[in-house]
């Protein structure tokens, strides 16, 4: 049996996503498809345009058989943490045989070599990394230059790790190597607009689609079913949700925490707490705050992630432990009638408990050997994230807590 695994956000699902999925199916010819999908907050440090339940419906209509939620603690980390959670979930299913991701280079061998440099951490690599960090570079940039030093000697094009999908692909491969996974990795060349391109086109970026939604423009480049789901959610007042909607919550939380409170949280080092407090006290909207906080070292994305860490009270030890031990459960968001068969197999063979009903979480934990304390921390954050996200809905009637307990599984 061949089972294709993909990592997605579908924020929202567009034609580029369909190309990746269709190409992956042609490459692997799988019996089933499993997707790990970010929940209500995504890797850019922003709320998703519509919630995880609506985006699960998009995924199932696109042809995915089982959708598993990527716990929030991984979904809003950098590429390394995001990849750690995603790949460890796919591996824990014990049914996924092949993982396919998009990349700008479509050169799996080179990406694997770059990943091995990160995993092996040679003395020369560590020395270069330390030197660049001392020169004031952020860790991601310092590591990038340290890798450049290594691969340039081997005649490998350094452009390979300059692009976002290549960078994320390297992180996927690094995790696969670290955990010695039996899953086979493949890559599909990314087509269409680049990740941050805001211009609408035949195959747009999700950024461009969200921009069209924000400014009330005609939404192009998405499948008909995506359009229908978005229209339904927007009409019900369950979206669209934008990063700007976080501002007042974030401002209040940061003022209450203060610099000392922020510095106890994950990611608040290198003076960022002081800078963010000063900026938030003198800003009147999210754009204003981001502009005042941004530096060469602190990009918009890094700042937005830290804003979420503050809002959601994410501490260092929790993130460290989560990255070390991985996700402690497989939370199912939805499945197709065809995927029901795979879900039964997964429930028997997965190395982590498969959760189809949050109310029965504790009972499910008894069936597998897991870090119970960490599992509860991870789920608590997921539940809190859903409740907080719900408070951002346009329709006051829809601003209900405990949606994770009330919303049934999506079945297509």
Image (tube, grey):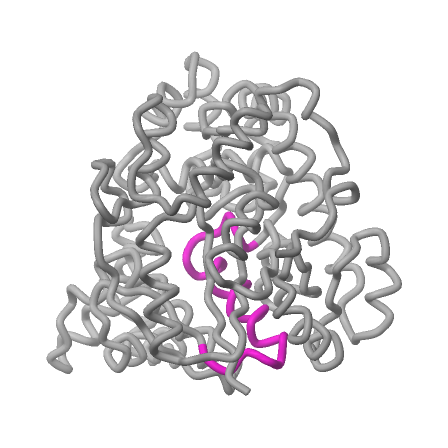
Q: Position of residue 325 (x, y in %)?
A: 64, 69
Tell me what residue is drawn at x 22 percent, y 63 percent: 104
User: Quick check: is 89 in the magenta stretch?
Assistant: yes
Q: Image check: 236 left or right of 76?
A: right
Q: How many marks?
A: 0
Q: Is residue 29 left or right of residue 358?
A: left
- The residue depicted at 66 percent of the width and 56 percent of the height is 411
Q: Residue 115 appears at what percent x and percent y?
A: 34, 75
Query: Where is residue 241 drawn, in percent x and y?
Result: 50, 29
Of residue 311 and residue 22, the one placed in the foreground of this image is 22
* The C terminus lies in quadrant: bottom right
Q: Is residue 267 left or right of residue 312?
A: left
Q: Nearer the viewer, residue 274 or 19?
A: 19
Q: Which stretch is magenta? A: 74-98
> Where, by quadrant of the figure, is residue 332 drawn?
bottom right
Q: Up-down: is 102 above or below 264?
A: below
Magenta region, main secondary structure: helix
Q: Residue 168's quadrant in the figure? A: bottom left
The answer to whether residue 195 is visible is yes
* Observer able to see residue 325: no
Where residue 247 appears, as percent x and y from the top left, is: 50, 22
Q: Residue at x 64, y 40 (%)?
A: 385
- Please identify the quadrant where the N terminus is shown: bottom right
In the rendered view, would you say 227 is above or below 177?
above
Let me know if residue 319 is in the magenta part: no
């Amino acid at each position: 049996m061949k089972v294709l695994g993909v990592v997605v956000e579908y924020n929202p699902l567009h034609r580029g996503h369909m190309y990746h999925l269709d190409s992956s199916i042609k490459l692997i010819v799988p019996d089933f498809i499993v997707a790990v999908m970010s929940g209500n907050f995504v890797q850019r440090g922003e709320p998703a345009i519509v919630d995880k339940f609506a985006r699960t419906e998009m995924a199932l209509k696109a042809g995915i058989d089982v959708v598993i939620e990527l716990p929030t603690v991984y979904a809003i980390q950098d590429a390394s943490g995001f990849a750690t959670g995603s790949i460890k979930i796919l591996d824990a299913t014990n049914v996924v045989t092949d993982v396919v991701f998009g990349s700008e280079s479509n050169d799996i061998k080179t990406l694997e070599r770059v990943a091995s440099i990160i995993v092996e951490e040679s003395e020369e690599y560590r020395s270069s990394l330390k030197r660049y960090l001392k020169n004031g570079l952020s860790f991601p940039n310092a590591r990038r230059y340290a890798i450049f030093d290594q691969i340039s000697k081997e005649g490998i094009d350094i452009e390979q790790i300059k692009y976002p999908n290549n960078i994320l692909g390297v992180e996927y491969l690094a995790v696969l190597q670290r955990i010695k996974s039996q899953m086979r990795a493949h890559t599909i060349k990314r087509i269409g607009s680049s990740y941050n391109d805001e211009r609408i086109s035949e195959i747009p970026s999700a950024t461009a689609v969200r921009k069209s939604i924000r400014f009330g423009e005609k939404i192009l480049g998405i499948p008909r079913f995506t359009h229908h789901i978005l229209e339904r959610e927007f009409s019900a007042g369950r979206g669209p949700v934008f990063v700007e909607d976080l501002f007042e919550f974030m401002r209040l939380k940061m003022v209450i925490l203060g610099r000392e409170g922020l510095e106890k949280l994950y990611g608040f080092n290198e003076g960022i707490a002081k800078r963010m407090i000063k900026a938030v006290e003198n800003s009147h909207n999210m754009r204003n705050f981001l502009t005042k906080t941004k530096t060469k070292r602190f990009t918009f994305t890094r700042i937005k992630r830290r804003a979420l860490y503050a809002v959601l009270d994410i501490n260092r030890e929790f993130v460290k432990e989560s990255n070390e031990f991985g996700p402690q459960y497989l939370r199912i968001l939805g499945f197709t009638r065809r995927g029901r068969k795979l879900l039964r197999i997964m429930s028997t063979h997965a190395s982590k408990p498969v959760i189809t009903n949050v109310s029965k979480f504790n009972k499910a934990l008894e069936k597998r050997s897991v870090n119970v304390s960490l599992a509860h921390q991870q789920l608590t954050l997921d539940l809190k994230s859903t409740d907080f996200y719900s408070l951002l809905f346009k329709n006051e009637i829809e601003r209900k807590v405990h949606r994770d307990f009330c919303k049934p599984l999506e079945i297509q």
